[in-house]
Amino acid sequence: MSRPRPSEVYDLLRDHAGGSDETARELVLGLTWTLCRGEGGMGLAMSPAVETGIETRRLSWSGTLAGRPLAELAGWIESWQPFEAAVGMAALNAALNPASKLAQAAVPLAAGNLAVFDHFLPHLAGRKVAVVGRYPGMERYGEELELTVIERRPGGGDLPDPAAEYLLPDMDWVFLTASSLTNKTFPRLAELARGANLVLMGPTTPWLAELAQFGVDFLAGVAVEDAAAARATVAEGGGTRLFAASHLRLHRVPHLLKRSYLDLAYALTREAVVLRKLPQRRGPILQPSLAQDVLLALGQYPHGIRQ
């Protein structure tokens, strides 16, 4: 398989969003999240860190974004200016995610911002696991897992960005923040993780099955359920509060692609998070079982998880 150009994933995102004829109703640049509300729903992206040094007091486009076509704003994903890229990613998600069949086919798991890790925990013991982007509360897995956290702004115990070049090719599992799409590190990180089970995760995740061609095995993103509450959380500087607990939901997922695969998800008050098993063009694939409750609920078995 030929190596994809770094720009190919952005071509994919832009092409899918380019079919939207919606306009942006509102843009909110919060401390943690950026929100774009279109006519059909909203999209989220992680906001740039304050430490980026960008002079936010002089953003030339402030006050001019509402009313612009989502397809136009989605093109900003290719910008190297961090706040423009965040606006572009949120606009992309506003164009793509609200009507996504992947997001609509949510199979709930437990609530909380670490539910994705909790779900996969039985498969991570004894494996080499890397998380790109630190998630609050992850220290609780320190004694259970052989866990490496790679972070752009490393804290105690974290490794800096360059460690990815050395460590990701040897990992069994890689959990990759979808904000890597916004900051342009996704193409290289996904390439380095091609030998691992790769989970693209977080509210920034776009619901596109075609991300499988870049090595993504699972999508763990959000479907906004309470738009007003989500907006208030973003506008008031919220971070993990976006992941408030809620009731469980379960849906049978139709097979949309050639190959059998399993859809997993967890539900939140403000959002429902879905893990999508994507068909791969790489292997080999083995066959240990997944969570029995999910298997029984769906009445099917996936092809398996690479070991």
Image: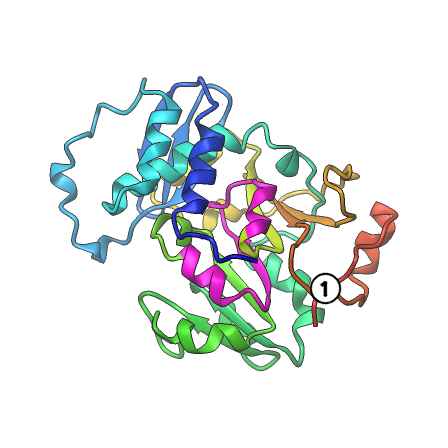
Report crowding for label 1: few under 14, some 14 to 19, many 20 or more residues within 10 A (C-alpha): some
Residue at the spot x=23%, y=53% of the render?
50
Which residue sits at x=42%, y=27%?
Answer: 37
At which x and y percent is residue 115? 61, 57
Q: What residue type is labelled 1?
A: Ile
Do we see residue 20 in this rendering? Answer: yes
Counting from the top left corner in percent of width and height, residue 188 is at 41, 61
Q: Is mark 1 on a helix, strand or loop?
A: loop
Where does the magenta region start and end? Answer: 186-213
Q: How is the image coloured?
A: rainbow
Residue 287 within the magenta-colored segment of the rendering: no
Report if residue 196 lies within the magenta region: yes
Q: Which residue is drawn at 46% across and 77% down?
A: 167
Q: Where is residue 31 in the image (x, y as percent from the top left)?
A: 31, 46
Left or right of 135? Residue 74 is: left
Which quadrant holds residue 293? bottom right
The vertical placement of 266 against 98, above or below, is: below
Q: Is 96 placed above or below 51 here?
A: above
Q: In this view, does 196 lie to the left or right of 154?
A: right
| Mark count | 1
Question: In front: 270, or 9?
Answer: 9
**Mark 1 lies on residue:** 305
- Residue 132 or residue 249, whichever sits in front: 132
Percent position (x, y) of residue 212?
59, 50
Farthest residue toward the front?
2
Q: Name the quadrant of the N terminus.
A: bottom right
Position of residue 297 in the picture relative to residue 205 (left or right): right
